Amino acid sequence: MTATNGGPMPASDATGDRPGAGPGPARGDTVSAVVRQWQAVHPELDTGPMEIIGRINRCAALLQQAEDAPLRRAGLSRAEFDLLGALRRTGHELTPGELARETFSSGAAVTKRLKQLTERGLVERRGDTRDRRVAHVRLTDAGRGLVDGILPDQLAYETAVLSVLPPGDQGELAGLLAELLGRLEGRMGALRA
């Protein structure tokens, strides 16, 4: 199939029309404007990946800007809550290295957060009896109470954020993102090996 300029037709365009898929919903988001601009500059290129990755990145940026109101009220960042949540959901002590893996954070970032959370009395560190270089981190009662108190409000907030999509669409989106994430994690793991 060719575009009106005689070049190949892109796999998708910013209006949501996909060859063979019939007309899609009109899209007026910021990514569609960027895609239209790139299509004008390079009509021969398939901008389909840009439409997906651009929208994932834009959604992530908007969600980060919103800063999770319940967490903000509790004086926590998302990264701090994720660290506390990892300790709560695993139900046992973790080393800083394990926390870094659980929260997809760097070791330096975890160390900084642990220092702040320890000063606030939300976590405790204890040295390993066999290896003094290793620390074990656990939630204090105050930390456990904070996580358990915030979680219902945070989930209600996230539900409200996603309420712009019907429940069926939310399920479909969750499934597609899970499939993409699983494949990317497997692929990236294989590339690192």
Image: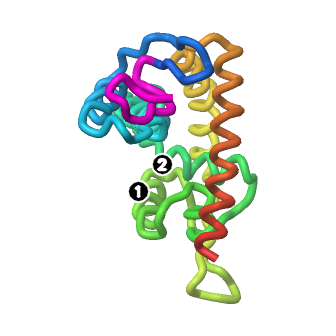
Circle 1: residue type:
Gln
Residue 54 vertical placement versus 132 (above, below): above
Q: Is residue 15 visible to us here?
A: yes
Q: Mark 2 and 1 residues: CB-CB less than 8 Å, in contact?
A: yes
- Vertical placement of residue 160 versus 89, above or below: above
The location of residue 139, given as percent across then percent down, is 62, 54
Residue range in magenta is 1-15
Q: Which residue is mark 2?
A: 80
Residue type at mark 2: give it.
Glu
The reply to whether the magenta stretch includes residue 139 is no
- Residues 135 and 182: in front is 182
Question: Which secondary structure lies at badge 2?
Answer: helix
Q: Is residue 132 above or below residue 48?
A: below
Task: State the image coordinates of residue 19 (x, y, percent, origin top left).
Answer: 56, 23
Question: Which residue is identified by label 1?
Answer: 116
Please tell me how many numbered marks the rendered image carries. 2
Which residue is found at the position 59% from the left and 19% from the top?
159
